[in-house]
Amino acid sequence: MKKSDMCILAGRNLSRSKGRTILTILGVVIGCCAIIITVSLGIAMSQNQRKMLEQMGDLTEITIYNYGSVSSDGRKLKLTQRELDQISQMPDVDAVSPLKTSSQFDFKVTSQKKKKYEIPSLSFKAMDVSLLSALKYELTQGAPPPVVKRIGKTIPVLVGEEFAYEFQDKTKKNHNMVSAYDTGFAYSGDMLPGGTGQGGSDAGRRKPPYIDIKKNRLYLTVSSTDKNGKEKIYRKELQIVGTLKANMNKGYETQAGIIMDIRALEDFERAAARALSAKQERNQGYTQAVVKVNDIKNVEEVQKAIKAMGFECSSMEEIRQSMEKEVRQRQKTFGGLGAISLLVAAMGIANTMLMSVNERKKEIGVMKVLGCEIKDILTMFLLEAGIIGLLGGVCGVGISYIISFIMNTMGSGGEEMGMEMIEGGRLAVSVIPAWLVVFALLFALGVGLLSGAYPSRKAVKISALEAMKSD
């Protein structure tokens, strides 16, 4: 018998009892929908959690800490350039840079304009500026500062997009407030220069900054008081060579602070210590460093290698793994519930096919008498069961997409996770990737074929003579 004839015959046989066939297919549809939707919820949850982690920091970065690290033999470790070079040679490491976010001095940025504007508490970061691109720092204008071992008349720096708005008027009583905005205005991150806050009120309109950082001379300033109570001041002019694109994953410095080369900072601190007669801190090595890994999959291995050197380190990998473990457990639970639904549907297919075999005994006998091969009879019944499973899977996929669309339109995937404020728009509640659709279709087809296996074997075992005698 030709395959095309078998398909036509199987379709006709299923159409004999349309109501029973439709109900059986409906069972597969429900089971298939249950699997797709429940698994898609877990996939969406995993993606939402990853987005949340990305808002908290770069998933491919490892931060090394050296606060009194001790080796396995009890030797006190120093995080020097030698160790950083060793780490940079590790497989899958793209870049390694020392970091410094604090100083023995309290830094201020002052302006020459009337000498009354300053940034009293400067947010800064010192690092190897030659690695800015490798560490995924972006500039909106200008170029990275040059690498210098000794600073000259100026210190080349990068500033954040909102740096100019950090200047405060020292003569005002409320100088601790952000002076770039009208009193009472709560800053919103989506506020554009000259725009208005939520509701469009003029009270939220941003004032122009006190300082034009392109025209006014700015100074990095430190001070100390001697025994006689006299204040000593040391300062160095800043040369703004570029503006950073704001990225809170990289730190507040990209928004309203400065980034400079770590060698320039060290030279400035030495000069300031001499000028202010301050005790210079002993070189204990770098206290922090950042490691950029080429792929999130390799973060764990690199982190283990760094810990084996004796240094403490952290990354978002530990949090990501624990969260993904929880998501996988939920997916197993969700998928198990869907599988139970499909198991019930499989029992329905088996029941339908057994009833079909009992009702068509005479037909089976006629086919055997006419010389139809056993494998053709077996194939025909398996084909009918497979068609039920496949049709149920196709309909289930279509309905699942509709349900997923409604869920994503009506709900927010971040509310129960406290993620509704994450940048980038509404989070998905349900995500159906292509592989899940293929899996669901193959699973539904497989369930249909397995469910039809026993009825098909029963059909081929029926005696032709006995089948001819049946009504």
Image (tube, rainbow, N blue to C red):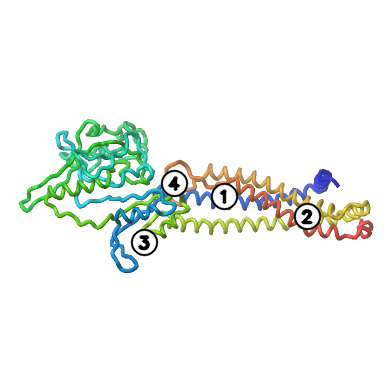
Q: Which of marks 4 and 3 is in front?
A: 3
- Considering only order in the chain, which callout, 1 or 2, is on the residue closer to the N terminus? 1
Q: Could one spot residue 420 in this view of the protein? A: yes
Label 4's element? loop
Residue type pointed to by label 4: Glu
Label 3's element? loop
Residue at 73 percent of width and 57 percent of height: 450
Residue type pointed to by label 3: Met
How many angstroms separate mark 1 from mark 4 (CA)?
Answer: 19 Å
Q: Are marks 2 and 1 in contact (CB under 8 Å)?
A: no
Circle 3 is placed at which residue position? 309
Residue 354 percent across, percent down from the top left = 80, 57
How many angstroms separate mark 2 from mark 3 (CA)?
Answer: 66 Å
Circle 2 is placed at which residue position? 352
Residue type pointed to by label 1: Ser
- Considering only order in the chain, which callout, 2 or 4, is on the residue closer to the N terminus? 2
Crowd class of label 2 (few under 14; some 14 to 19; many from 20; radius 10 Å): many
Label 1's element? helix
Residue closer to the observer: 355 or 120: 120
Residue type pointed to by label 2: Thr
